[in-house]
Image (cartoon, helix red, strand yellow):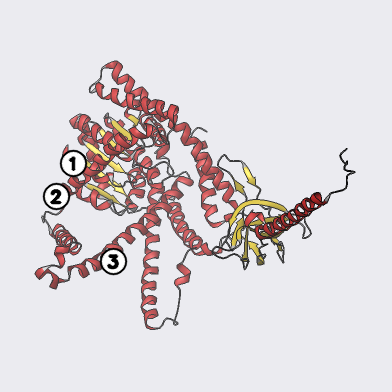
Amino acid sequence: MKKQLPVIIGLIAGLVFIVQFFSPAITPIQERFTNWFIVVSVFAFVLGLTNLITINLQKIQRREENWPYSFPLLISLFAMAILSFIFGIEKGPFVWLFNNMMLPMSATMFSLLAFFVASASYRAFRARHKEAAMLLVTAIIVMLGQVPIGAAGVLQYLRLADITNWIMAYPNMAAQRAILIGAALGVVAISLRILLGIERAYLGED
Amino acid sequence: MPKKSLGFPTHTNKATLTVFVTVMVALFFSIILVSASHAQPTPRPPTNLGGEDTPLDAGGSVQLSWTASPDDTVGGLVEKYILSRSTKLEGPYEELSYVITSGTTSYADAGLIDEKGVIQITKPKNNINYYYQLIAVGKGGVKSEPTVIDQPVMAERQWFHPGRINMLVASLVLSLFILIFIWQASLGKELYIRPIAGLEAVQEAIGRATEMGKPVLFIPGIMDMDDIQTIAAVTILGRVARMVAEYDAQILVPTSRSLVMTVASEVVREAYLDAGRPDAFKPDNIRYLTDDQFGYVAGVDGIMLRDRPAANFYLGTFYAESLILAETGASIGAIQIAGTAMPSQLPFFVAACDYTLIGEELFAASAYLSREPKQLGSLIGQDWGKVIFLIFIIIGSIIAIFNQLNPDLISIKSWFEMQ
């Protein structure tokens, strides 16, 4: 029963969502299921938070490797929580800390992307074989076609912007659609496997 | 002895009285004139109030439309409209507290719930005739004559969405193919599945991590459990964790959603139990980091640089963090297997990872790794679905070419349009 109950719940919930797509009349039931998901998520958030605090407290207690890093994490966590309870989340120190610490740190992580794009491009564009050489040529055309220098001087006669538009609108779009169609079919197949109880890996079964 | 007044006005008093009466009369007329100049004119009522059931819904909603009052112009008399409803033409009409501003010519009566979840306006009940009246309200709250709807309106629920019949047919045909092949597989028919390099490498990656005495890192995307890619990732996690348990290695699963952490924890625990090694399961290895996208990236990058996993799996939904994660993984020399159905992130994974599962391969991975006939049967059915789509694409392309020559020749575009 322990293994059957999740399958039955999954089957009922899955069928409600599928049927609702074709039958607007059962939208209220589907909305109720969605609300239940939010309720479950809230309880899960408590578990997540407990997990985070427990792991870091244990790290400090046991003096595990890199344990000092757990201090700023826990201090930040409790400080933000306490400040939000006292001053609210729309103004005051919580917003100040969010705008002046959280956002710049997120922006820093995001800006790392520029450097990683450069290193990944360097690896991907090395013309070691035929496909990589094609990728390299295509990338150069698309890059030049999207910057002013691609339409300057002698390069203007190559009409790189037009070639870029063609590459993006046809081969690139065709490949993206092929991926999306394949993924959509995959979604149907995995959904059926889960609904019928054939796929049970998420229950720890083969 | 002075003459006493007997109460009659003297000559002087007469003049005073005359002035007083004149002033009073003037004042009276002034007040009337001023009042008249401040009285607000009554706006003319809206016309042609009509209504119909809101289409393709679960009922409880009526769509109303009208022709605006002639005084409803920019800077005109009308400030707002008041809508009322009744189950009888003669009333009484219940005023609905919708805010219908001037310039509006249609409105849906579908009830109103405020921010605290309190019902302010009840929905119209299904299958009951309602009459509506609309009043234009001018400056100073002056109301026009009410306009009453000419025909009653009834809210109804729709049991079938006719605009999605094409999707229903396509889904049924595809499901039928998948079910046929699952059934054939269950009868013991030999099935051939084309090898997928990324999945063939899973065992190799876990074996390498075991030999090096380093952990396996599994990232199930950054979305929650309501995302199908996360569900696919969790099913793969079950297979990978089982292999990890059998090899006596360790698996780290940092998650960006607490619900995913809860599910992943159960999946890994069950996998260890199923492999006969429940004692080797470490609950602390499945941990929640943060919901914040780049906070999560920072946390995972930290884990990579500190724990130096030998095999990294990135399976699920990814956005801008895909390349940051994959490049950090590449920098520590880990063997990397990625899989996502996000077309915009696939190039990054292809560039930075050793193997990439593209789109459908992510959803096929768990079935492929299980080698169970029924699951493999579903993959064959999925491939046949692709054949059908391919046929439709070819037919559609031919018809599109002919349509360019003569648009009236044949039109099947509407067959494929979903509402």
Q: Position of residue B286 (x, y in %)?
A: 34, 30
The residue under label 2 is: A123
- What residue lies at 37% left-to-right and 80% top-to-bottom? B404
**How many residues crowd around disc 2 within 10 Å: few (fewer than 14), some, or many (20 or more)?**
few
Observer-nearest residue: B327 or A175?
B327
B61 displayed left or right of B11: left
Give the spatial CA distance, label 3 vs label 1: 32 Å
Query: Mark 1, residues whose alpha carbon is within 10 Å: few (<14), some, or many (≥20)?
Result: some
Q: In x, y percent, where is residue B379? A: 37, 53
Say which chain tag 1 marks: B
Give the tally of numbered discs: 3
SS state under label 2: helix
User: Callout 3 environment at 10 Å: few (<14), some (14 to 19), or many (20+)?
Assistant: few
Left or right: residue B398 versus residue A151 is right
Quickly name the residue at label 3: A169
**Can residue B91 be seen at all in this image of the molecule?**
yes
Which residue was labeled with disc 1?
B330
Marks 2 & 3, CB-CB < 8 Å contact: no
Q: Amino acid at mark 1?
A: Ala
Callouts 2 and 3 in the same chain: yes
